[in-house]
C-alpha cells in the first residue's frame, strides 16, 4: 500500500543516515510524502555516497554502504531500486579500474550489488535475449509507388539488442564485462528518471575508462577531428602530431593511421606497465555505453554540460576502438561524433540567426 511504501522508504533512509553519519536533508526526506523520489534527486546525499564509494577501502565484503544498496534493491520498491541504479556510474567507476589494476583485491561488496542487478534482470527476462527485427533493405518499402510484387517470401532478419543471460553466482573474470554491462543497460532503461548529474558522472567515467593506461590519451581530440574529416570532407592531407596521412578515397587504410602512430609512441616509451592497467572494453560494455551516450547527446533533458561530456566520451571511445581495431565499435562511435558535430552546428546556426535578427 501507499503507506507501507512510505514507511519502507523512511526505514531505508534512516539506515542510510546511520551509515553516512547523518546528512542535512534527513528530516525533510523523512517528512516527505515521496521520500524515495526525493532521495533520488538529493544532491547532498549523492555527494556523500559517491565520496564513500570512491574511497580506497570501499567495495569490500563488509562494506555497509554496499550492503545497504544490496538490501535496498531487493526491497522490490521501484523507486528505491531507482535510487540504487542512480549510483551505478559511481559503483562502476570505482569497481572497473580496481578490478583491472589489482585483480586479487577483494571487491565483493561492489560485486554483490552488481550481481543483485544482474540477477533481477535475469529473472525478469527469464534469461532470454532481447531481439529486434532488422528490415530487409532489398525489399520495396510501403512508400514505393507502384509496389512491385515480390515472388518470394520476405526474409525476416533479427538481431540481438541484448544477449541472453546465464545465471551467475559470482563475478568471474570472464563474466565481469557481461555483468557490468547489464547494470549499465539497466541504467540506460531508467535514464529518463535519472538526475542529470548521474548522466554527467557516467559520461566523465566512460572517457576515463577509454583513455586509462593509454599513452595517446592527450591526443584524443585530434583523432576525433581526423575521423570527422575522413567521414565528412575527404581529400585533404591531415597532419597529426608529426604523422601525415591522406584522408579520402585514395587512402583505404586511413582509419588506422592514428592507431599506427599510437603504437609507435607506446613502443618508444616502453609502455608495458600502462598496458596492464588498461580497462578492458569488450562489446558487452561498449553496447550499453553507446546507448547511454546517444541519449545524453540527443536527449531533450540533457544539460549542455552533459552533452559536452558525452561528446568528449565519444571521442575517447572512437580513439580506443580505432586503436584496438574493433569494427563493430568504430562505426557507431564515429556516428556519435557526427551526431555531436551536427548538433553543435545546428545550435551555432540557431544562435547566429537569433543574434542577427
Image: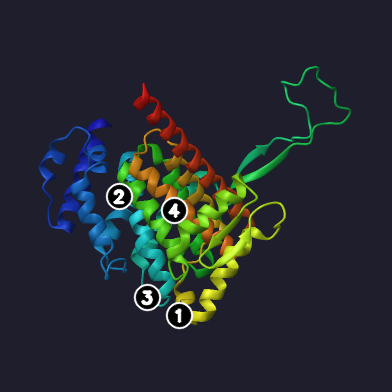
Comes first in the chain, label 2 or label 1: 2
The residue indicated by pointer 3 is 105
Comes first in the chain, label 4 or label 1: 1
Residue at 78% across, 31% down: 139
Q: Nearer the viewer, mark 2 or mark 4?
A: 4
Q: Nearer the viewer, mark 2 or mark 1?
A: 1
The answer to whether residue 285 shows anywhere in this view is no
Label of residue 76 in the image: none
Neighbor class of circle 3 (other Cα within 10 Å; few <14, some 14-19, many 20+) is: few
Secondary structure under badge 4?
Answer: helix
Label of residue 313 in the image: 4
Q: Relative to 263, is 142 on the left or the right? A: right
Q: Judge by depth and name the residue closer to the eye, 94 or 1.
A: 94
Q: Judge by depth and name the residue closer to the eye, 348 or 124.
A: 348
Q: Separation of disc 1 and disc 3 at Cα?
A: 18 Å
Proximity of marks 2 and 3: CB atoms separated by less than 8 Å: no
Proximity of marks 2 and 4: CB atoms separated by less than 8 Å: no
Q: Judge by depth and name the residue closer to the eye, 218 or 291.
A: 218
Q: Separation of disc 2 and disc 4 at Cα?
A: 31 Å
Secondary structure under badge 3?
Answer: loop
Label of residue 72 in the image: 2
Neighbor class of circle 2 (other Cα within 10 Å; few <14, some 14-19, many 20+) is: many
Q: Separation of disc 4 and disc 1 at Cα?
A: 24 Å
Neighbor class of circle 1 (other Cα within 10 Å; few <14, some 14-19, many 20+) is: few
Q: Separation of disc 3 and disc 4 at Cα?
A: 28 Å
Residue farthest toward the top in the current orientation of the protein: 146
Comes first in the chain, label 3 or label 4: 3
For residue 319, above or below residue 43: below
Neighbor class of circle 4 (other Cα within 10 Å; few <14, some 14-19, many 20+) is: many
Residue farthest toward the bottom in the current orientation of the protein: 270
Q: Relative to 4, is 320 on the left or the right? A: right
Amino acid at each position: 500500500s501507499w503507506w507501507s511504501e512510505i514507511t519502507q522508504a523512511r526505514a531505508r533512509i534512516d539506515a542510510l543516515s546511520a551509515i553516512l553519519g547523518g546528512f542535512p536533508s534527513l528530516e525533510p526526506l523523512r517528512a516527505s510524502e515521496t521520500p524515495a523520489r526525493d532521495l533520488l534527486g538529493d544532491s547532498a546525499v549523492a555527494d556523500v555516497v559517491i565520496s564513500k564509494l570512491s574511497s580506497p577501502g570501499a567495495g569490500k565484503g563488509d562494506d555497509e554502504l554496499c550492503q545497504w544498496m544490496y538490501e535496498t534493491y531487493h526491497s522490490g520498491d521501484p523507486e528505491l531500486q531507482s535510487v540504487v541504479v542512480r549510483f551505478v556510474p559511481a559503483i562502476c567507476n570505482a569497481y572497473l579500474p580496481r578490478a583491472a589494476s589489482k585483480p586479487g583485491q577483494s571487491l565483493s561488496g561492489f560485486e554483490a550489488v552488481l550481481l543483485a542487478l544482474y540477477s533481477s534482470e535475469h529473472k525478469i527476462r527469464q534469461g532470454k535475449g532481447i531481439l529486434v527485427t532488422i528490415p530487409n533493405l532489398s525489399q520495396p518499402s510501403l512508400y514505393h509507388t507502384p509496389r512491385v510484387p515480390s515472388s518470394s517470401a520476405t526474409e525476416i532478419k533479427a538481431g540481438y539488442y541484448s544477449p541472453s543471460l546465464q545465471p551467475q553466482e559470482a563475478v568471474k573474470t570472464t563474466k565481469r564485462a557481461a555483468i557490468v554491462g547489464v547494470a549499465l543497460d539497466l541504467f540506460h532503461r531508467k535514464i529518463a528518471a535519472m538526475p542529470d548529474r548521474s548522466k554527467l558522472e557516467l559520461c566523465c567515467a566512460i572517457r576515463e575508462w577509454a583513455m586509462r593506461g593509454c599513452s595517446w590519451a592527450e591526443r584524443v581530440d585530434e583523432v576525433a577531428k581526423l575521423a570527422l574529416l575522413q567521414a565528412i570532407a575527404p581529400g585533404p592531407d591531415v597532419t597529426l602530431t608529426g604523422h601525415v596521412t591522406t584522408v579520402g578515397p585514395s587512402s583505404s587504410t586511413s582509419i588506422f593511421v592514428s592507431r599506427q602512430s599510437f603504437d609507435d609512441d607506446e613502443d618508444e616509451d616502453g609502455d608495458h606497465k600502462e598496458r596492464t592497467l588498461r580497462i578492458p572494453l569488450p562489446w558487452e560494455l561498449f553496447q550499453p555505453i553507446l546507448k547511454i551516450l546517444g541519449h545524453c547527446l540527443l536527449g531533450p533533458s540533457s544539460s549542455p554540460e552533459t552533452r559536452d561530456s558525452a561528446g568528449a566520451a565519444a571521442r575517447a571511445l572512437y580513439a580506443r576502438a580505432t586503436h584496438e581495431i574493433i569494427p563493430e565499435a568504430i562505426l557507431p562511435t564515429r556516428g556519435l561524433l557526427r551526431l555531436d558535430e551536427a548538433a553543435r552546428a545546428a545550435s551555432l546556426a540557431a544562435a547566429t540567426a537569433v543574434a542577427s535578427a
